[in-house]
């Protein structure tokens, strides 16, 4: 395709800028295929983008909510009307299957539409003050320039759920997507810009994390950072955010090692579906993936046998092949991480009950059979560290109490699930789980866009994302007192 050869440029101050450097966007399902050529900006472009966002802020922050609403609605409509094409692009660059890619694009459109509505519903309070004759108002104001830094695993939905509320509440944005997946990011920005954003309100700087991301998290003219990615990168960004003259507001969504508890009284078919869907679909590359199955003794062997049976029926293949259930790993580096952990698990004494082999298929890609470890003790590295691939471990426990203890025995706290038919255990798990998201008889992954999203412990830092709660991060509260 002709468009694949032309360079997709960065957007700074409303101009698609000439690229001084480029990257090839490689298809992980078939590394012979280049999905497109994308600009690779550096620190200079990042600085220019921050200046453009700063310059655009005063006017944009005073626009009518109706204008912001209408732009987001138009963008939502275009994303939705192009969901098949954009899903194809997303799956080509990230490697999730086409239905998963189209599903993610649909979610991005839904988020844009939801946040369009939120721009009309900015909350506030007006109450009598405590002094006679004093009126008080609590209002929310835009916070300024927001740096958005996103990971590769949800290349359109995560940018949408950060950029849409930023814009809805009157902020300007500099957006740095993950280098591995510039295509979906570029398409989203192009759509938003053509939907009517004034120049400089949304700026796109594709480029490396340390350079472009580093400028955003340390620049004194950036007021806030919304980041999703790994814990080590999040920590570094947090240090940058508080080291400058102005301590930035930050929202960090990071890794997980999410448990799925299966009790003796669980419906086996539901438990297997939750486990396989949550751990292995999207190639296990979801922050909410369940990578630890914590299973009580009475159901353990039946559960493991049924999961293996289900895994045997799954086809690993090209993301765009309609027969494929699980696409490739995103790149060679992540494949190496996954294989290294499979090796570590074996050496630690866990039993590799199924899979874990690299697959050579007709198309050269990063294919990996899902791996299931059993006899994993909670102290093993495969049971503690985030792998971020299709690798899950089974830990055998006596009863609910031990299951709950093992589930909470982690530095992470993003999502947790339980499969049980007992109201009592379901209620206790919801109450005592140390995770931000708890699921009962549902896979830990797969979440509603109108609800708050985020975790606890090392998984998250700062206010929640998404739904009506997004306003807390993207606005500043002012308390005003008036005597007339
Ligand atoms: P990552 O390596 O931490 O990268 C995330 C983003 O940060 C990328 O855009 C990256 O740029 C950028 N970055 C890297 N170094 C930086 C620096 N020094 N300063 C500023 N930005 C920098 O994470 P990933 O490998 O893309 O994504 C996988 C991780 O994301 C997993 O840990 C997963 O659990 C987590 N995740 C969490 C959630 C959640 O909501 N909790 C959702 C999805 C994913 P480049 O990579 O382009 O260089
Ligand atoms: Mg990375």
Image: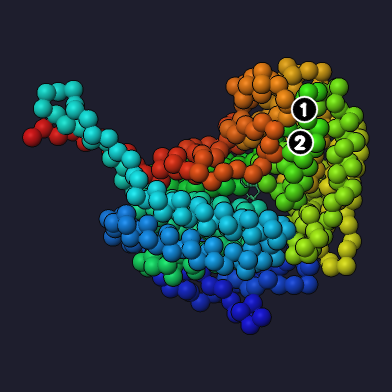
* Residue 273 lies in quadrant: top right
Q: Residue furthest left?
A: 484
Say above or below: 418 vs 229.
Answer: above
Q: Nearer the viewer, residue 472 or 299?
A: 299
Residue 240 can be seen in this image: no
Element type at mark 1: loop
Say if disc 2 is inside 8 Å of ligand 1: no
Residue 146 left/right relative to 123: right
Q: Which mark is residue 196?
A: none
Residue 383 position, x and y percent, is 78, 33
Q: Residues within 10 Å of mark 2 (few under 14, many from 20)?
A: some
Residue 142 position, x and y percent, is 34, 48
Residue 7 position, x and y percent, is 58, 76
Model colouring: rainbow
Q: Residue furthest bottom?
A: 2
Q: Nearer the viewer, residue 44 or 52?
A: 52
Element type at mark 2: helix
Say above or below: 61 vs 440.
Answer: below
Which residue matches tag 2?
270
Q: Nearer the viewer, residue 344 or 261?
A: 261
Residue 452 can be seen in this image: yes
Marks 1 & 2, CB-CB < 8 Å contact: yes
Q: Residues within 10 Å of mark 1 (few under 14, many from 20)?
A: some
Query: Residue at horizontal 40%, vertical 48%?
Result: 118
Residue 240 left/right relative to 329: left
Say above or below: 281 vs 76.
Answer: above
Query: Residue at horizontal 54%, vertical 40%?
Result: 453
Residue 77 position, x and y percent, is 48, 63
Which residue matches tag 1?
266
Whole-number angstrom distance, CA of label 1 to CA of label 2: 8 Å
Query: Residue at horizontal 86%, vertical 44%?
Result: 310
């Amino acid at each position: 395709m002709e468009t694949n050869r032309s360079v997709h440029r960065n957007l700074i101050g409303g101009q698609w800028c000439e690229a001084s450097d480029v990257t090839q966007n490689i298809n992980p399902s078939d590394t012979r295929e280049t999905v497109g050529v994308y600009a690779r900006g550096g620190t200079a472009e990042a600085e220019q983008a921050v200046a453009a966002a700063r310059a655009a802020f005063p006017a944009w922050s005073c626009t009518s909510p109706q204008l912001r609403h209408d732009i987001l609605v138009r963008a939502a409509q275009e994303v939705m009307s192009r969901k098949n094409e954009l899903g194809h692009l997303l799956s080509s660059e990230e490697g999730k299957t086409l239905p998963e890619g189209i599903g993610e694009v649909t979610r991005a459109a839904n988020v844009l539409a939801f946040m369009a509505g939120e721009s009309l519903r900015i909350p506030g309070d007006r109450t009598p003050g405590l002094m006679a004759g004093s009126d008080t108002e609590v209002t929310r104001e835009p916070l300024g320039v927001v740096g958005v830094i996103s990971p590769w695993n949800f290349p359109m939905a995560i940018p949408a759920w950060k950029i849409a509320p930023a814009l809805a509440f009157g902020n300007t944005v500099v957006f740095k997507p993950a280098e591995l997946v510039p295509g979906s990011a570029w398409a989203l920005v192009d759509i938003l810009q053509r939907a009517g954003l004034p120049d400089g309100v949304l700026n796109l700087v594709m480029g490396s994390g340390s350079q472009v991301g580093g400028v955003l998290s340390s620049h004194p003219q950036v007021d806030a950072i919304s980041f999703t990615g790994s814990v080590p990168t999040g920590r570094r960004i947090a240090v940058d955010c508080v080291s400058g003259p102005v301590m930035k507001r930050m929202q960090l969504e990071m890794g997980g090692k999410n448990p799925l508890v299966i009790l003796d009284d669980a419906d086996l078919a539901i438990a297997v579906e939750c486990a396989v869907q949550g751990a292995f679909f999207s190639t296990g590359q979801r922050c909410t993936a369940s990578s630890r199955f914590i299973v009580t003794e009475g159901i353990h062997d039946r559960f493991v046998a049924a999961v293996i049976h289900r895994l045997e029926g799954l086809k690993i293949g090209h993301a765009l092949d309609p027969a494929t259930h699980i696409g490739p790993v995103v790149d060679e580096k992540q494949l190496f991480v996954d294989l290294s952990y499979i090796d570590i698990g074996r050496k630690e004494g866990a039993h590799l009950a199924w899979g874990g082999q690299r697959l050579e298929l007709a198309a050269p890609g990063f294919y990996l059979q899902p791996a299931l470890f059993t006899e994993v003790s909670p102290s093993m590295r495969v049971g503690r560290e985030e792998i971020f691939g299709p690798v899950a471990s089974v830990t055998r426990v006596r009863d609910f109490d031990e299951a709950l203890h093992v589930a909470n025995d982690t530095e992470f706290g993003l999502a947790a699930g339980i499969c049980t038919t007992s109201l009592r255990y379901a209620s206790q798990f919801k109450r005592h789980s140390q995770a931000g998201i708890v699921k009962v008889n549902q896979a830990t992954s797969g979440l509603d866009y109108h609800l708050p999203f985020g975790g606890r412990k090392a998984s998250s830092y700062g206010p929640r994302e998404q739904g009506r709660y997004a306003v807390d991060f993207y606005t500043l509260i002012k308390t005003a007192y008036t005597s007339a």
